[in-house]
Each structure stands twice: as structure tokens, then as C-alpha cells.
Image (cartoon, rainbow, N blue to C red):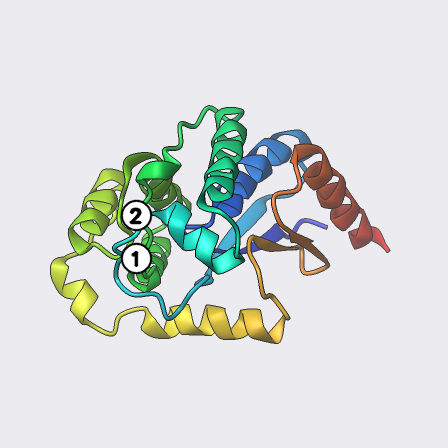
């Protein structure tokens, strides 16, 4: 077969497992290297569609309340995530993360995809959130990130309805597919891979999905 091997990915900007999963997938694809092009298609998923633009409490306190644990336990989760990120050359500052509504960030991702820069935009937004304290709802920060990767966007974009339908369609498709958590990846329309399972596990599933083509 000569057609592209497709990877559809549902993720959210503020999801640590999504960023780790992205890096794991990048490493896995270097080892997988099929004899056909690989086409990665990004899809929007909001972990909390009802989230306000910002919160007045630290992320650790929000997570502790959400999961019913002590704040120190949430901070330990952060330290583990930072250690895992370091394995991929990333420096995360979870204590500085400012979470909030990600809908406009997803719209920006969709715009970037239309300009051929979707993956670059997604990477820049995640790096901004986990390493630089970017508030994902802050328009000025979003525009700065867009400029960094060469995406053309104006302040008026965020007041328009541009790419609202595209984001909602991604989210509706996730519901239809039974996706309730991210990252979720559909490999070549055949295999579902959920979570940041590690590079070896991803290579294995990629290879099995490709082998299924000949059956």
C-alpha cells in the first residue's frame, strides 16, 4: 500500500500526559519508520469545557480538590511529571502553570493547521503552558506564540466565529468514538492508543497497526 499511515490525535493544551505522549510518539516514529508517509492529524479536546478564563488558586490546589487528595500529593504528581519531561529534554515548571479555558487555544491550533503549521503551533502552546507559565486563554500570549511559529493571526480572530465549528466537530467526533480522556490516538483507522504509555509500547502498537494493512 502507498497511501499514508494516519495518526489522529485528540489532546488538550493543559494535559501533561498529552505533551508527554506527543514526545513519546515523536521518538516512536523515529523507530517505526514505515515505507509510506505518516500523516498526523490533530483534534481538539477540552478537559474542562466549562473552565473559566483563569483561576485564582494554584494548579496543585485545584487538582487536590478535584481528586480529593492533599495538596502535597498533587505537588508530588507535579514532580513526577517534571522528571518524566526531563527525560525528553524539557524543563517543566508545574508550580508556575496557570490553567484556564483552552477553547481559543484550540481554535488557534485549527487556524495554524489550515496554514500548514498545526504541529508547530501545538508544540509551542504546550511548551508555553508547561515551561513558561502561559495562560491558555490569554489572547496576547496566544498571538505571541502564533507569531513565534509563523502563524498569521490578529486580535479580531478571537472575537470572530472562525474555527469554532471545527473545534466543536472534533469534540463531537470524540464523543462518537467513546473518547473520554486524552491523549487518545487512532492509528491508521485501526488501533486506539490511549495515554502516554511509553516509547516501546507506542512502537509496538504502530507496528501492529501497520501489519494489519496486509490482512
| Image coords of residue 122 (percent x, y) | 39, 47
Q: Are marks 1 and 2 in contact (CB under 8 Å)?
A: no
Q: Which residue is located at x 40 percent, y 32 percent?
A: 92
Residue tagged 2:
98
Q: Which residue is located at x 55 percent, y 56 percent?
A: 182
Considering the numbered disc 2 on the image, is that residue within a helix, a strand or a loop? loop
Visible residue check, residue 49: yes
Mark pair 1, 2: CA separation: 18 Å
Foreground residue among 10 and 6: 10
Which residue is farthest left? 155
Tell me if 25 is positioned left or right of 90 in this view: right
Q: Which residue is located at x 35 percent, y 65 percent?
A: 51
Visible residue check, residue 12: no
| Image coords of residue 80 (percent x, y) | 53, 33
Screen quadrant of the C terminus: bottom right
| Image coords of residue 87 (percent x, y) | 53, 24
| Dot 1 or dot 2, earlier in sequence | 2
Q: Quadrant of residue 133?
A: top left
Foreground residue among 190 and 95: 95
Comparing marks 1 and 2, which lies closer to the viewer?
Answer: 2
Marker disc for residue 131: none
Tell me if 4 is positioned left or right of 154 in this view: right
Residue tagged 1:
108
Amino acid at each position: 500500500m502507498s497511501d499514508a499511515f494516519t495518526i489522529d490525535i485528540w489532546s488538550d493544551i493543559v494535559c501533561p500526559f498529552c505533551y508527554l505522549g506527543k514526545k513519546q510518539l515523536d521518538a516512536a516514529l523515529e523507530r517505526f519508520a514505515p515505507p509510506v508517509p505518516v500523516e498526523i492529524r490533530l483534534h481538539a479536546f477540552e478537559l474542562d469545557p466549562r473552565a473559566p478564563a483563569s483561576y485564582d488558586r494554584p494548579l496543585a490546589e485545584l487538582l487536590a480538590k478535584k481528586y480529593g487528595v492533599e495538596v502535597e500529593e498533587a505537588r508530588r504528581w507535579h514532580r513526577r511529571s517534571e522528571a518524566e519531561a526531563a527525560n525528553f529534554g524539557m524543563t517543566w515548571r508545574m508550580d508556575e502553570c496557570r490553567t484556564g479555558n483552552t477553547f481559543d487555544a484550540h481554535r488557534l491550533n485549527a487556524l495554524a493547521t489550515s496554514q500548514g503549521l498545526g504541529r508547530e503551533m501545538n508544540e509551542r502552546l504546550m511548551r508555553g503552558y508547561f515551561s513558561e507559565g502561559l495562560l491558555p486563554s490569554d489572547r496576547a500570549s496566544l498571538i505571541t506564540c502564533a507569531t513565534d511559529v509563523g502563524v498569521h493571526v490578529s486580535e479580531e480572530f478571537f472575537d470572530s466565529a472562525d474555527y469554532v465549528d471545527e473545534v466543536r466537530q472534533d469534540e463531537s467526533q470524540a464523543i462518537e468514538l467513546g473518547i473520554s480522556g486524552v491523549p487518545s490516538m487512532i492509528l491508521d483507522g485501526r488501533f486506539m492508543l490511549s495515554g502516554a504509555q511509553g516509547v516501546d509500547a507506542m512502537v509496538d502498537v504502530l507496528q501492529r497497526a501497520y501489519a494489519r494493512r496486509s490482512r
